[in-house]
Each structure stands twice: as structure tokens, then as C-alpha cells.
Amino acid sequence: AQTMFEKRVELRPDDWRSDFNLGQLHYFGSKWPETIDYLRKAIELNSREPALWLMLGETYIRMDSLDNAEKTLRNGHAIAPDDKDTNYMLGFVLYQQQRSRESIPYFEKAIAVDSTDFRAMGILASIYDGMGRYDISDSLYERALQLSPNNSVFNNNYSYSLSERGIRLDYANQLVDKALQAEPNNGSYLDTKGWVLYQLGEYQGALEYIQRSIEVRDTSAEVWEHLGDVHEKLGNFEEAMKAWRKAYEIDSSRKTLLEKLEQHQN
């Protein structure tokens, strides 16, 4: 296929589609610099084609060049402001840059254009959840899970949100179990399961899952804090203090940790 498209470029050097096809071939072969070269050539020939800007933006994302990805996708968005994929990808880049609030209009536009875009729903749900807009986030999680019921990320994130609020805990337990069925050794999911059990008052079960989570990911202050909380409920105060101190070493900005450490030191 590559040889054929290269011949077409030689025969019709002004046809952007040949360069685009070559760019696609290299993209699916994970040859990012070559992909960029061909897509740029195609854009020189036809800068009004949204698909070119979209694939170029996705290539920059693959290379973890988010600034270039944002600039590229904004060019595509200027040409096709109603294109669902361009809106989604631009929102995704902003989200990856920790610019969640800026990303919201693009995810919302993607959903407005395509009411089945569960990708945008899932990320938008997590953004609104972080803002405390639970009425919106819960609705988005429910819609996303109707469209993609076995999505482990959505199941885990929604479960954790419910567990943090201490509501619908039996449902939260079902959600995280689905996530763990897909990825039984995922440290984040194991912690969520442990935290749901903690909120249900099943402290021994919570301890087992959170300890398993620590074995997989021991760099999370949140998981260490959860471990300390469980030990406290079980009356293991020395173990609780050890876990909280470890959490504080990782992230000293967590105010809840300071309160717990000060309370038990006195």
C-alpha cells in the first residue's frame, strides 16, 4: 500500500489525499515523525480538510506534545467547529493539561453533536464530580454506563464518587466489582473496593483490598491515608499512624492527614 501511495504522489503531487493516506499508514505503524511529515504536506495542499488537522493533533498527543496538539486541534476546530471528534480531542488535550474547566464546552459540544459519545460523557462526569456538581456528574455517569456498561474506568470512578459521599453503597459495590472483573490487579480499583467496604463498615475486608492496592501502587497518599483510616477503625492505632505518616511523606498538603496525626499524637 505504501508503494502504491508513493507512486500516486509522484504521479499527482498536487493531490493531498495521497499524502494523507501515507500519513495514515505511518500513524497506524506508530511512526510519528513520518506521520507528521506527510500530514503537513497534505495540509499545505488542502488546509480546509478537518480530518488532516485531527489526525495531526492525535499524532502530537501520541508523542506527548500537548502544546502542539492544542494548536493543531484549534486550527481544525476553527474550520469545523461542529465536528464531534475535533471537539472531543481538543477537550481531551485541555483535560490532559489540567485545564478541566476550559475543556468543558468542547466535551459538551461533542455530546450535543453525538448523544452517544460516552467517551466525552465519562470525562465530563469526572470533571463535574471534582467540582462537586454531583447532579450533573451522576447523570453523565449513568448515561455513559448505559452506552458502555463494561467500561472499567467509568464503573470505578462512579463507584468511588458514590463511596466518598457515602451514598448508594450497594450500587457502588456492584460498580467496582465490574471494574475489578476487567482489571483485577488495578491498584486504583482495589482501593475503591476497599473504600466502599470501609463505608459499609466491613473493615476487615476493606483492609485486605487496600493492602492489595498498596502492593500495586505504593506512591498514592490517598491509598496510604485510607489504610490508616481502616487500621484506626480496627483499633490498630500504631499501624494507623505509620500509614498516615507515610501518606504525609508523599503529600504534605493533605489537611485531613495533619488533623489525624495531631489528634492521635495528643
Image: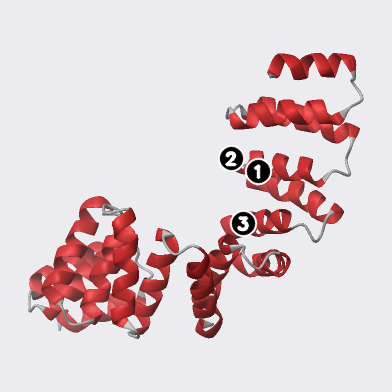
Q: Residues within 10 Å of mark 3 (few under 14, many from 20)?
A: many
Distance from the alpha carbon under mark 2 to that under mark 1: 6 Å
* Residue position marked by numbered label 2 in the rendering: 62
Residue 133 x/y as whole percent: 54, 82
Residue 224 x/y as whole percent: 24, 64
Q: Residue at x 49, y 62 (%)?
A: 148
Name the image quarter holding the C terminus.
bottom left
Residue 248 x/y as whole percent: 28, 66
Q: Residue at x 73, y 65 (%)?
A: 113
Distance from the alpha carbon under mark 2 to that under mark 3: 12 Å
Give amino acid for label 2: Arg
Locate residue 145 relative to residue 71 in the image: left or right.
left
Distance from the alpha carbon under mark 3 to that under mark 1: 10 Å
* Residue position marked by numbered label 3 in the rendering: 92
* Residue position marked by numbered label 1 in the rendering: 58
State which quadrant residue 97 falls in.
bottom right
